[in-house]
């Protein structure tokens, strides 16, 4: 499958070698398995007819949504992986197809709507031919004309009477889709968006647009300390919890989150070094042989200098020190 690995590394190289280490780590892994790398050194901003609504003070963490949308818009891949800059591939023998196989085991159907996504993106980028009374509604109508779902997989139940809110995206495309569209983990507290895979599909386009829309205007979500994770929880979890809370029959069959999201265990895709996991007992400790290590939270519990040494220590567990001895960034 055609897979892109997307990262934004907007860090000052005079303060940390993280951006350089991340690029070297991703380049080596992608070359080994034939994946594409899409790496930004500055936070991107997705541009369309709605860009003007984005808060100018929006924190950079939201840029992962823009980076994913930009990559999906190119129409060159079947899956797009997001990997936070402060995460490294550690077991390079593990292929992303291995993870996708695990994630899709309960519903292996492929929407096969790549062409529909490309057509939707072309119309999205072109915008309305005439100025509509409500531009946001025009884009919503465009989404409605393309989104579809498949509820034929019997492995999981979807809520029959879920709360609806068109602006938020609480609609049938979100509630009834059972094919796997998003692969991500949790960190013992909530959904973790530091490592995730999104299918190149109309569903993913609608999902990340709705996440992005939560930053429009003076939205309280924009400055939330969990940023885009909060917006994604509002879509993937919150309405499903509400549906379960209002109907005991739904609660008995529901997993409490969208069936389009395949939730993998922390150990599978985002373990943490002991410095972090010892402080956050809900976070699983990375051990040798695990696939990815995530340093998220390092600076909360230590200094930049200690984190830099941690980055270097893990990086050189999978790369040769002599081979990079002359790299000026290291």
Image: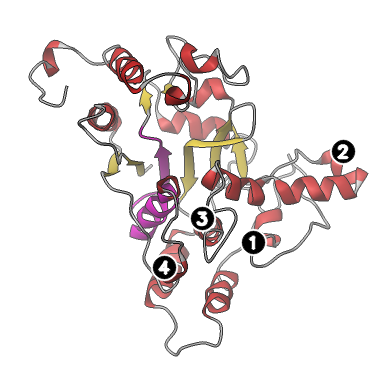
Q: What quarter of the picture does the N terminus occupy? A: top left
Residue 295 visible (yes or no): no
- Contact? badges 2 and 3 (CB < 8 Å): no
Q: Nearer the viewer, mark 4 or mark 3?
A: 4
Please, what secondary structure does the residue beneath circle 1 have? loop
Q: Is residue 66 magenta?
A: yes
Residue 204, percent from left and from top: 52, 54
Count residues near mark 2 (Cα–Cα under 10 Å), then give few for <14, some for 14-19, many for 20+.
Answer: few
The circle drawn on residue 51 is 4
Element at label 2: helix
Read off the magenta span.
63-85
Residue at (37% x, 51% y) in the render: 67
The mark found on residue 208 in the picture is 3
Is tag 4's residue or tag 3's residue first in the polypeptide sequence? 4
Q: State the mark number for residue 169.
A: 1
Report, in whole angstroms, how far the alpha carbon at label 2 lies from the one at label 3.
29 Å
Q: Name above or below for residue 8 compared with residue 211.
A: above
Label 3 SS: helix
> Which residue in the structure is indicated by mark 2?
252
Sooner in the amino-acid sequence: mark 4 or mark 1: 4
> In the rendered view, would you say 313 is above or below 86?
above
Colouring of the image: secondary structure
Q: Earlier in the sequence, mark 2 or mark 4?
A: 4
In terms of depth relative to the viewer, which is nearer, 179 or 163? Answer: 163
């Amino acid at each position: 499958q055609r897979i892109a690995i997307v990262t934004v590394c907007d860090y000052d190289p005079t303060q940390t070698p993280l951006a350089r280490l991340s690029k070297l780590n991703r380049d080596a892994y992608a070359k080994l398995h034939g994946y594409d790398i899409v790496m930004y050194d500055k936070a991107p901003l997705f541009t369309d007819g709605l860009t003007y609504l984005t808060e100018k003070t929006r924190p950079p963490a939201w840029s992962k949504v823009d980076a994913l949308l930009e990559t999906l818009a190119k129409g060159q891949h079947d899956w797009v992986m997001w990997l936070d800059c402060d995460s490294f591939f550690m077991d390079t023998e593990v292929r992303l197809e291995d993870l996708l196989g695990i994630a899709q085991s309960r519903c292996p159907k492929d929407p096969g709507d790549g062409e529909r996504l490309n057509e939707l993106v072309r119309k999205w980028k072109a915008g309305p031919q005439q100025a509509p009374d409500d531009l946001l509604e025009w884009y919503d109508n465009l989404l409605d004309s393309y989104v579809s779902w498949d509820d034929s997989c019997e492995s999981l139940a979807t809520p029959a009477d879920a709360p609806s809110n068109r602006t938020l995206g609480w609609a049938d495309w979100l509630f009834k889709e059972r094919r796997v569209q998003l692969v991500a983990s949790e960190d013992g507290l909530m959904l973790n968006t530091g490592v995730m895979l999104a299918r190149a599909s109309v569903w993913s386009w609608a999902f990340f647009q709705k996440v992005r829309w939560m930053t429009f205007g003076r939205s309280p979500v924009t400055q939330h300390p969990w940023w885009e994770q909060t917006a994604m929880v509002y879509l993937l979890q919150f309405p499903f919890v509400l549906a379960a809370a209002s109907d005991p029959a739904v609660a008995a069959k529901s997993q409490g989150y969208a069936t389009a999201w395949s939730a993998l265990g922390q150990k599978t895709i985002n373990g943490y070094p002991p410095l972090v996991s010892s402080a956050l007992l809900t976070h699983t400790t990375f051990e040798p042989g695990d696939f990815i290590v995530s340093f998220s939270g390092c600076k909360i519990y230590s200094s930049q200098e200690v984190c830099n040494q941690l980055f270097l220590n893990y990086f050189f567990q999978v790369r040769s020190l002599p081979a990079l001895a002359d790299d000026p960034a290291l």
